[in-house]
Image: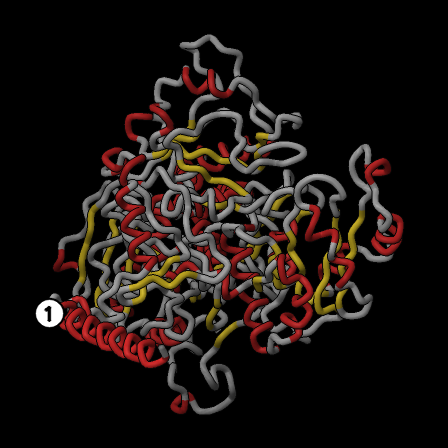
Amino acid sequence: MQAKKRYLLVLLSCAFLAYCYFGGYRLKSEGIAHFTEESLPTYVDTWKDQLYERDLEPAPHLRRTGNSYGVRKGSSNIVNQKCRMETCFDFTRCMKDFKVYVYPTADESTGEVPLTPSAVYQKVLDVISESRYYTPDPSQACLFVLAIDTLDRDNLSADYVRNVPSRLQRLKLWNGGRNHVVFNLYSGTWPDYSEDDLGFDTGEAILAKASMSVTSFRPGFDISIPLFHKNHPEKGGEPGFVSTNNFPINKKYLLAFKGKRYVHGIGSETRNSLYHLHNERDIVLVTTCRHGKSWKELKDERCDEDNTEYDRYEYEVLLHNSTLCLVPRGRRLGSFRFLEALQAGCIPVLLSNGWALPFSQVIDWNKAVIWADERLLLQVPETVRSIPATKLFSLRQQTQILWDKYFSSIEKIVFTTLEIIRERVPGEAVRDGRVWNTAPGGLVSLPKYTGAYPWAGSDPGRNFTALIYCQLGGNLTPTSSLYKLVRAVAKSKFAAAIVVLWTSEKAPPSRNRWPPGGPPLYILHQPGASQRFSPQPLVKTEAMLSLDEDTTLTTDEVDFAFSVWQHFPDRIVGYPARSHYWDDAKGTWGYTSKWTNDYSIVLTGAAFYHRYFNYLYTEWLSPLLLKTVEQSHNCEDILMNFLVSHVTRRPPIKVTQRKQYKEQPPPTGAPRSPWNDPDHFIQRQTCLNTFAAVFGYMPLLRSNTRLDPVLFKDPVSNLRKKYRQIERVGS
């Protein structure tokens, strides 16, 4: 019996080996065994193909790496998508220009009662209507913004607008939402605060929404915006609270938070657990149940203890004395704490899983915030204690850049939203990440400009182009101030060209009347032109020397000012200085030409600046500002100072003290200079206040720095001085 069993086992073994041999040979011959790991499609590749078959697109956290995609840990892998720019946006409306149409608050054709938007939404509409984006003609518009207030879609709110679906259907231009952008701060209501509950169908409209989750966010289509307070400034905004060299890096508290916790409803889990991390020393995380009408009925056993601990700390003190600030989710994913922490320079520690951060399409948040996981709350102290001091310093400085450039006002939030959409339009230039994430930011770095930005750190060049603004139309003789000025500039070894912008109705002198020799001289006759800062194709250099026709400068003064500008290409560098001040008695800004210990304006009648500011002046400034200059025939030099100081947040630079830089009053019968007009000073003071109102703040910065040549006025031989003519003039 045992022998039969052994014999049967041997036969089965042989049969199995034969099957493996011949079966394996057949498989080899069919080539199946030749598959390698590289030839097999990844799961993500297969999933991505399925998405495109369903007219969807992968989420933004999938980044192409070779032939596969890297999935960020903790991200949602599948986003339920329907709209993309290619399928839900009409690009043909944007081919001429990127313009935005704002609906009127009342459509006379429907006979409806005019809508009254909330104060916050009115700010949104106002900043668009007063901007260069706005067009009153819907046929010229690329984007449309509703007059219907959609910011607060909590139906328990006083700002909730009812009957939105029927109102939308009556809009002739609605077109299912195509090419519309819908702004929203709050969605859903108590107790679940559903993110998708807006109370109306947005159709194909782009959502510019706060507290968006990565699962609801449509990559490349929607815009995630920050949650901001109702009193958030319309324009300008307060600066960040951190100076450039603010030490020590570590403040009194390492990590802090003070806010509500929710004993009922969504958003309760994370904040209810913060007391586990609170140690009263370097980590202060305090919450209160004391909010809402029924908090006493809903309170739990910890409420009394939490409320007592909560009252021990002042929120502002914690905010300004903490290195890092916890930003946990509230009822919704976003929180007011986010912008408050950014402004204070308190590095946000985000505790809100799945939140699509504001403007993440262009902002690299890795440089400004710390991510934490709500599911790993107890690991937060260890995480924040492991961050090196150099990293903390870098993160803190970046919070100030982002706050100042994109979040300090409603205007900046709205403009950033519009610029992100603009960059999606075919044919529009796109800024790279470095431009968006470094000062002065993407909003003032116009991508259509082909040259180097003045703050880019590139070579400013070794030559300049002089532009002389002539509006008096006086006679050109060897003794006239204009003749002397052209001759002095022409002798500079750095002058590449001289452009004379002749705006007088009188014809300019013939070419043989001008000083001979020197660099190329171009005379442009543009009668009545008031825009002296319009970009000139003849200007090929980065440096521009702006001059009035009656300015008196020597060649040495020109050369020295240019050498200073080469070290500060993002500033206005020149001779005549003015100052602004606040007049308490009148409650307005004052303008003075008196010599004081500081200055805030360097007039462009004799100053160097980067040619990019001409482009920015013409293409970027609000039409209201340009209209003010055009109507007054004055103040363009003040506006240029406003612009440069606003963009760079730096004051101008004055060189070599000069008591006189204008020619003396002309003789009887000669054209009168506007500088001698008694109304000239009054106009300029009015302009100063108008500009400050439109900017939303006063961008001019005072300085008491003056740069002089070495040995300028020292009692030594003049032969030892490099700029010998400077001491002889105006001393």
**Residue 688 visible in rendering:** no
The residue at the point 74 percent across, 56 percent down is: 273
Where residue 653 sits: x, y (%)? 48, 67
Question: Relative to the observer, which residue lies in front, 344 or 617?
Answer: 344
Say what secondary structure mark 1 lies in. helix
Q: How is the image coloured?
A: secondary structure
Left or right: residue 411 compared with residue 334? left
Residue occupied by mark 1: 29
The residue at the point 80 percent across, 48 percent down is: 288
Left or right: residue 318 compared with residue 565? right
Displayed quadrant of residue 421: top left
Where residue 172 sits: x, y (%)? 35, 18
User: From the image, which quarter does the N terminus lie in?
Assistant: bottom left
Question: Relative to the observer, which residue lies in front, 304 or 503?
Answer: 304
Where residue 52 sits: x, y (%)? 28, 46
Give the residue at the far front of this rendering: 1
Few, some or many C-alpha atoms within 10 Å of disc 1 (few <14, some 14-19, many ≥20)? few
Question: Relative to the observer, which residue lies in front, 293 or 123?
Answer: 293
Where residue 621 sits: x, y (%)? 41, 45
Give the residue at the far top of this rendering: 111
Left or right: residue 410 compared with residue 156? left
Q: Relative to 197, is 458 above or below?
A: below
The residue at the point 31 percent across, 74 percent down is: 459
Identified by mark 1, the residue type is: Ser
Displayed quadrant of residue 152: top right
Question: Relative to the observer, which residue lies in front, 482 or 493?
Answer: 493
Q: Relative to 446, is 194 above or below?
A: above
**Residue 407 visible in rendering:** yes
The residue at the point 31 percent across, 46 percent down is: 51
Displayed quadrant of residue 567: bottom left
